[in-house]
Image (cartoon, rainbow, N blue to C red):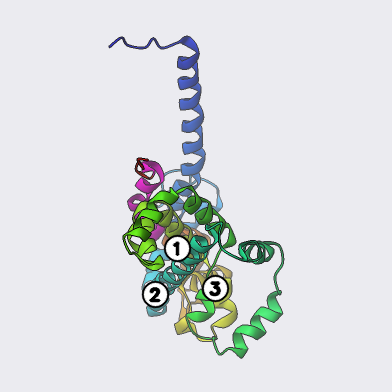
């Protein structure tokens, strides 16, 4: 087989592409490495702007203060529970809704799509939402976080478009073999949709993990907070003499914690997502093998 000749234009494209992508990696990675270095540096070097990619005056005072607080670990467990529960609910509802909307023969399909799209541009507002959640008795529970944010319309439309791209002949053949609608969804559609489902799981999980405002509104007790609210209050009170319910060391050590606590908060919040992301990343590049339908 004759090898195709690489043109000069293609080589230039490869070089430009490599330079641009390398620049994107550097721009993306540098701020995070700087934050990590700040979290391990002392207050004087951070304030003086001497910390770049490596810690200056290595210390763990801020980490010790945060990690020694039992409330931090309680809130961390809450975040894991809230994120898992809310993500499962969101995936189930979004998948079912998107699958229904992908059927052109569905009566009232345009109305259902319009209702979903309408919520992208208009909402009831903060006060009506708070009254609704309170009147339903959802305060101080995971449902206050999971249910109001159960369906992202953007994710819904993405999944709908994906389901529409699947060959209808596969579902017709499964229907002839006696599968019900739910059987077709579970045994035919979802196995072919691993990539989009994994992507939606990542989108929802990151969103719920980083969310703090809903819990800030609807959670009245510290032991019910997610870790994002804990860290938010930690940052807000970084220059005070107490945070997270525990008094911090007075004097220079307190100033040091105040200078590095924001970096510590960012590192502790993003670390779990960074650990999970590589296991889902392969679904973004592998694509989906829809298979061939012979006629």
Which residue does the image show at 51% across and 22% down from the upper left? 16
Return the residue nearer the eye: 214 or 229. Answer: 214
- Image position of 199 with respect to 135: above or below: above
Q: Which residue is mark 1?
A: 205
Mark closest to the chain's N terminus, 1 or 3: 1
In the image: residue 61, left or right of residue 128? left
Q: Earlier in the sequence, mark 3 or mark 2?
A: 2
Q: Residues within 10 Å of mark 1 (few under 14, many from 20)?
A: many
Which range of residues does the magenta coloring cover? 271-287
Which secondary structure, mark 2?
Answer: helix
Quadrant of the rendered structure where residue 199 is? bottom left
Task: Judge from the rendering whether residue 100 lies leftward or rightward of residue 1; answer left or right.
Answer: right
Label 3 neighbour load within 10 Å: few <14, some 14-19, many 20+: few
Spot occupied by residue 140 in the image (x, y as percentages of width and height): 51, 86
- Cα separation between marks 3 and 2: 20 Å
Q: Residue furthest left?
A: 1
Q: Is residue 274 visible?
A: no
For this rendering, which residue is in front, 117 or 210?
117
Q: Give the Cα separation between the discs numbered 1 and 2.
A: 11 Å
Q: Local crowd at mark 2 within 10 Å, few (<14), some, or many (≥20)?
A: some
Residue 81's disc number = 2
Residues at marks 1 and 3, CA–CA distance in whole angstroms: 22 Å
Which label sits on residue 233?
A: 3
266 or 201: nearer the viewer: 201
Question: How far across and how far down the image is residue 215, in percent?
Answer: 54, 77
Q: Nearer the viewer, mark 3 or mark 2?
A: 2
Q: Position of residue 63 (x, y in %)?
A: 39, 65
Q: Is residue 7 visible?
A: yes
Q: Residue at x 50, y 51 (%)?
A: 164
């Amino acid at each position: 087989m004759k090898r195709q000749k690489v043109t000069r234009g293609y080589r230039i494209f490869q070089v430009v592409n490599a330079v641009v992508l390398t620049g994107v990696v550097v721009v993306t990675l540098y701020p995070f490495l700087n934050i990590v270095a700040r979290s391990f540096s002392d207050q004087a070097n951070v304030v003086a702007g001497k910390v770049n990619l490596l810690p200056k005056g290595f210390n763990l005072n801020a980490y010790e203060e945060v990690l020694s607080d039992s409330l931090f670990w309680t809130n961390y467990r809450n975040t894991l529970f809230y994120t898992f529960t809310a993500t499962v609910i969101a995936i189930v509802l979004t998948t079912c809704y998107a699958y229904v909307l992908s059927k052109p023969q569905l009566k009232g399909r345009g109305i259902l799509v319009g209702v979903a799209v309408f919520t992208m541009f208009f909402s009831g507002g903060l006060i009506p939402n708070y009254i609704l959640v309170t009147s339903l008795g959802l305060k101080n529970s995971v449902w206050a976080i999971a249910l109001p944010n159960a369906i992202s319309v953007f994710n819904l439309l993405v999944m709908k478009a994906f389901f529409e791209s699947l060959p209808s002949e596969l579902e017709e053949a499964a229907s002839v073999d006696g599968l019900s609608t739910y059987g077709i969804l579970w045994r035919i559609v979802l196995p072919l949709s691993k990539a989009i489902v994994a992507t939606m799981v990542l989108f929802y999980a990151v969103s719920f993990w980083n969310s703090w405002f809903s819990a800030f509104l609807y959670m009245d007790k510290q032991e019910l907070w997610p870790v994002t609210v804990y860290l938010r209050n930690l940052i807000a009170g970084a220059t005070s003499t107490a945070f997270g319910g525990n008094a911090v060391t007075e004097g220079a050590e307190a100033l040091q914690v105040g200078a590095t606590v924001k970096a510590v908060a960012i590192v502790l919040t993003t670390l779990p997502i960074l650990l999970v992301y590589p296991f889902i990343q392969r679904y973004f590049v592998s694509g989906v093998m829809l298979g061939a339908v012979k006629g």
